[in-house]
Each structure stands twice: as structure tokens, then as C-alpha cells.
Amino acid sequence: MLGEDGKVCEEETAKGGLDVEYIALLTVVFVIMFLAPFALSIIYSTVRKGSVLPISQEKRRDARYFGKAFSRLIEKNIGSVKDDTIMLSQMEEFIDGDKYYDYGKTVDKIIICKRHDFIAPKEVLIYNKEIYSAHSVDIRWPKTRLRAAYAKESMMLADRTSVERWVDARETLIAGDECELGMSATAGNRLSVGYGCHFRRLYAPQICIGQFGRDIGGFGEKTVLEETVRTNKDYTVLDGVVLKGDVCSHKGVRLCDNTVVTGNIFAETDIHIGKGAVVLGNVFTQGSVYVDDAARIGEQGSIVSMIAREKIFLGKSVCIYGYVSCEGGGLTTAKEGSVWENVS
């Protein structure tokens, strides 16, 4: 820029030079900040050779989570007990069930049996804390109320036992008639549920209502259809038909007596499964599921799911291989009468 005397203005030239230097400095700083994370990561990965973290791809939750988590806590800390207290989520007082103890009518401490089965005394009506047995649990007196119980072997619940939270047995769990099975009743091998029982979630490789169901054997003289059904209407599989495929309906599904579906059943409303009918796959509905006497869901050696947004009703001699869950609560049939008579 020229001044009045025609000379270059030295101050303006100097200012312009400073602006260029400032911009260049900012550019250098930006480049360093941008490249630094990449450079540091390359240096870190070169200097330190680590193993790849294992990531579980298993999508299925453990249906026996409550019992397994509780037993792990007990077994982890049982060796360091002091003054009959054990550290679980907090310090808890417990009763050594291997020794004689005058329980009274109400028990307000955890019971732990390490050497013997836990056999419920006749006088106890209410257990307000959990029961743990390294062997079996025998609740042999009707109308007993439990918070939760775990057996490393088998468990027996008498008629009209009421469970507040959960019960779990690593081998077999047998629940008598008219039991309230709380949030979850599970077993590692077999679960037998009596008549008139309420439940929310059941799990075992074999679940039977009242008595064990039958094997379907071969298809014999049945009519066989090899197709997958997708429909916006109610769908019915007629008596004695074998459908080799899935059924997907935006309304309801009904299986008549002695029908077989080798695939899955999905419905937006209710699913009715008739007497002696068999579904080898999963059953899922936004409505309720009604399973009549001697029906079977799944097969030995595989785990399937029966899930209902509303309710599940199970008839006599129904057998399910796997997982049962219903948000609206479930009910097994009364000892006398039909499963449909329980529907309210």
C-alpha cells in the first residue's frame, strides 16, 4: 500500500506478514492434532501385542439365571463365613440347616444345607428368605410360603405351595397341585407341574403337566401338506393333518385334534392347540395360547419356546420341551374338568 509520499507503508506490510505466519501456525497445529490419535494408536498396537477380546454371540438368555446366580454366591462365600453370617449382595445372617434348629412358624434368615437334604419342618409356614441345599429340597407340607429356593439335586413342592420369587433345581423339580410358582420355576432336567397351578415362566428340557405325554410316532395314514402358510386371516389345521412347515397369521391359529405342525407358529391373536396335537417348533403370539390335553410342544433333545403376550392355559398330560413365558400369567388345568373351563 502506498502512502501520501508514494512509499510502501511498512506497518501494513508487517501486519500482513504476521497474518500469514499465524495462519501457517494454526494449520500446523490442526494437522498435528488430527494425526496424533492415529500415530499413537499405531505405536501402541506395534509395541503391545494383545489378544482379541472374546465376544459371545449367544442371543438366548439363561432361563435358570436366578438359581445359578444365587448358588454361585453361596458357594463362592461359604468357606469364609463367620458367626453365621455370609456375604451375598450384603452381609446376611443364615441358619445352618445341617444342624437341629427350632425354626418356629416364620423363618427370617437364609437357610443353607451343605451336607444333607433340606426337609421342611412341619411347624414352619413362611420362609421369608432364600433356601439353599447342596442336595435336595423337600417342602412336604401344604400351604407353605417360600421366597425362593435352590436345590443342587431335586426339589419337591407340596400342594398349594406359594412361591414369591423363584424356585430352581439342577435336576428335577416337582410341583404339586394348586401351587403359585412365582416369577420363575425352572429345572436342569425335568419339571413336573400339578393341576391348578399359576405360573409366569417355566423352563426345563422336559415340562409335563400332571403326567408325561406320549410320543407321536410316525405320521401313519395322516394327510401330509408340505407348505409354509402366511395369511391375514384366522387359520385352522384340520383334524389329523400333518403340516410340514410354519404357520404365520396376522390373526389367530387353531390346530384341531391330533394335528401335527413340524415348524413354528406365529400369530397376532389367540392360538388354540387341540387334544393330542403336536408342534415341533416354537409358538409365539401377541394374544393367549390354549393347549388342550395330551398335546406336545417340541421334542426330546431340542429346546423350543412358547411365548404369549397375554396368558397361557395348559391341559392334562401336556408336554413341552423348553421354555414357557407369558406376561399375563399362566394356569394349568384343574384336576377335574377341561383346560377350557379355567378360562376367565
Image (cartoon, rainbow, N blue to C red):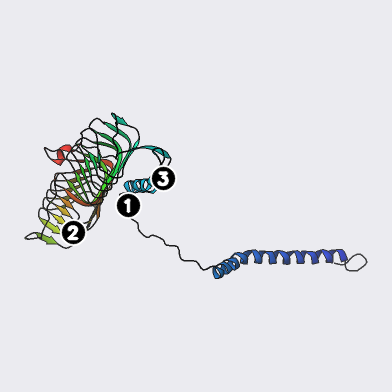
Q: Quadrant of residue 5?
A: bottom right
Mark 2, secondary structure of its residue: loop
Q: Nearer the viewer, mark 2 or mark 3?
A: 3
Instruction: Using the numbered discs, state the Cα–Cα distance from disc 3 to disc 1 in whole angstroms.
Output: 28 Å
Percent coordinates x, y for residue 75 in the rendering: 36, 48
Q: Which residue is mark 2?
A: 262
Percent coordinates x, y for residue 343 in the rendering: 19, 38
The amino acid type found where label 2 is placed reads Thr
The amino acid type found where label 3 is placed reads Ser
Mark 1, secondary structure of its residue: loop
Q: Is residue 182 above or below residue 208?
A: above
Q: Which residue is mark 3?
A: 80
Percent coordinates x, y for residue 325 in the rendering: 27, 46
Few, some or many residues within 10 Å of mark 1 (<14, 14–19, 20+): few
Q: Residue at x 33, y 49 (%)?
A: 68
The amino acid type found where label 1 is placed reads Asp
Percent coordinates x, y for residue 80 in the rendering: 41, 45
Q: Nearer the viewer, residue 234 or 152?
A: 152
Q: Residue at x 18, y 59 (%)?
A: 262
Q: Which residue is mark 1?
A: 62
Between discs 2 and 3, the one toward the N terminus? 3
